[in-house]
Image (cartoon, rainbow, N blue to C red):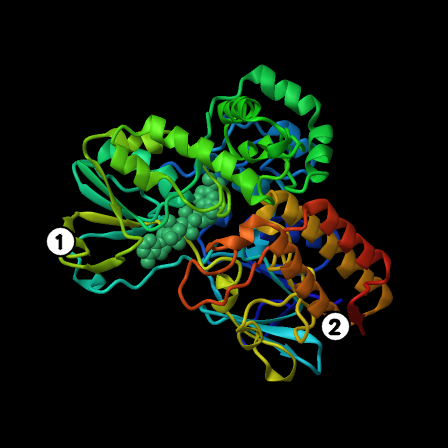
Amino acid sequence: MAQASAAHPSEIEVFDAVVVGAGFAGLYMLHRLRELGFTARVYEAGGGVGGTWYWNRYPGARCDVESLQYSFSFSEELDQEWNWSEKYSPQPEILAYANHVADRFDLRSQIVFDTRVTAATFNEDTDSWLIETDRGDRVTAKFFIMAVGCLSAPNRPAFDGMEDFRGPIYHTGEWPHEGVDFTDLRVGVIGTGSSAIQSIPIIARQASELTVFQRTATWSVPAWNEALSAEYLKEAKAHYPELRAKARARPTGFYFPFNLQPALEANAEERQQQYEAAWQRGGLPFLGAYGDLLFEKSANDTIAEFARQKIRSIVRDPATAELLCPQNVFGCKRLCVDTDYFATYNLPHVKLVDVSRTPIERFTRDGIVVDGTAYEVDAIVSATGFAAMTGSFDKIAITGRGGRTLAEKWRAGPRAYLGLASAGFPNLFMITGPGSPSVLASMIQAIEQHVDWLADCLSHMRDVGARSIEPLQADEDAWVTHVNDVSTVSLRSTCSSWYVGTNIAGRPRVFMPYIGGFPIYVQKCNEVMNNAYEGFVLK
Ligand code: N01
């Protein structure tokens, strides 16, 4: 393998691998590359590590997977030394954890911060990538690894008159580091997804008026967040390996009690009790109340009606309550997990505006106009989500064999073998790429599995002296078809969401993550590896 040359202005530095992104994926990839003796550089657009948790600093940001499972499992020492303070970790604590990992494993010296990769071009003569950045770096690497996250390219809808608005416009996914004080301000929030439902109750505590512009009502379940006691942590840490193993065996890659019984096998009274118990446990495990809730519409109708009744019981104004009641499949979009979201609409200074039938017309100097009505606000929070799964790929001019760009290849939707690599782009890898479980599993488990697979693959290539690896077109096509076929079995494919790309007008409708389940996917990856990288060509 090539060695990194001494930095000289006129020289192009050479690495075994260049990694884009210093979130959890980039950090762990760098750790494994170093362990294996590969030379590597990581480029990170932000000023620090942490990825999602570096950028999403909006009020109330926290993870919806329980802390003890939203963490790396590769180091028993790390598991034992780190103490999570709450059931669901707040953003600052997860960011502190990412920083701790970077320091503990001495990763910072190989990360170049505040630098965005702008282009990557494959050289067919040398089987290597030329990587360029917005700071003028030009480096080459045999392997180009995209560790850019799945929800990292903010979606900023272009509303008419945006430039006329006299106040600040914030995006939840690029929140100012110094924080924002909304005290005595009239605030407008656009969107009611996970970011909005977490921030709305907190913004409401500060703002003099809060107006929420809702296009689609959201399903949300209480978090019942709480502090973790020292005894709880001690007990959990004593059984960490078992918890990790149980998590990996679940379709979601994280563990929670799951009732396999079909909902309609129970009678109405039993279902009510089961849903009530699950509601009281709260969080994403609510969807584990019965086994068929995401497969059978009639089963889903029963949990949907239960959740609508909960909304009606919390929200006092009947018209507002009805507006807040989603009419689509329960859990079709990513289920939200909240603290006091629905109760916030009982506050006299909080207003809900329906923009489902008549979209936001325009921004003006003083606020937002919907259906001819002007809503005056001093600040706007755009909680409008992300160009999911592919948005961060679109920002880099990636050119593969024959001068073909990835953007061209993915115009009708992303195409990747196992969500790891794409035909025509040798030696390019993606961590939690489209076509892998990623966002439908616990992200950190999904990241570790991909990174470990890649680490094995790169070592194998070094051992056998292979210069390049690339998926076979036929195998990639078969995988993309499989990802699509499996998605149709799930009710999640039935609505518009960022899973299918249609949260943004004009994007192709393709179900992007693999919904066949984490263990099945891991088994497939292992089989590919054990069968001499079946479906890939190694040269
Ligand atoms: O984004 P979203 P998010 N006019 O796409 C609305 C993860 N996450 O940042 O539903 C008006 O879910 C849009 O409306 P609609 C998690 O996986 C996790 O909230 O498209 N409204 C929607 O209401 C999550 O799913 C955590 O009709 C417009 C909202 O904006 C994912 O990130 C916390 C609009 C966007 O919701 C994304 O969540 C936060 C327009 N032109 C995020 N355009 C936790 O771990 C968009 N909207 C808890």
| Image quarter hosting the N terminus | bottom right
Residue placed furthest toward the top: 231
Query: In the rendered view, would you say 437 is above or below 240?
Result: below
Residue 366's disc number: 1
Q: Residue type at mark 2?
A: Ala
Q: CA distance from mark 1 to mark 2?
A: 56 Å
Left or right of 81 on screen, residue 314: left
Where residue 162 appears, as percent x and y from the top left, is 22, 61
Q: Secondary structure at mark 1?
A: loop
Left or right of 108 on screen, residue 338: left
Q: Residue type at mark 1?
A: Asp
Residue 474's disc number: 2
The quadrant holding residue 148 is bottom right
Residue nearer the viewer, 156 or 40: 156
Residue nearer the viewer, 165 or 457: 165
The quadrant holding residue 285 is top right
Left or right of 222 on screen, residue 105: right
Query: In the rendered view, would you say 373 is above or below 283?
Result: below
Q: Is residue 163 visible?
A: yes
Where residue 389 appears, as percent x and y from the top left, is 53, 58
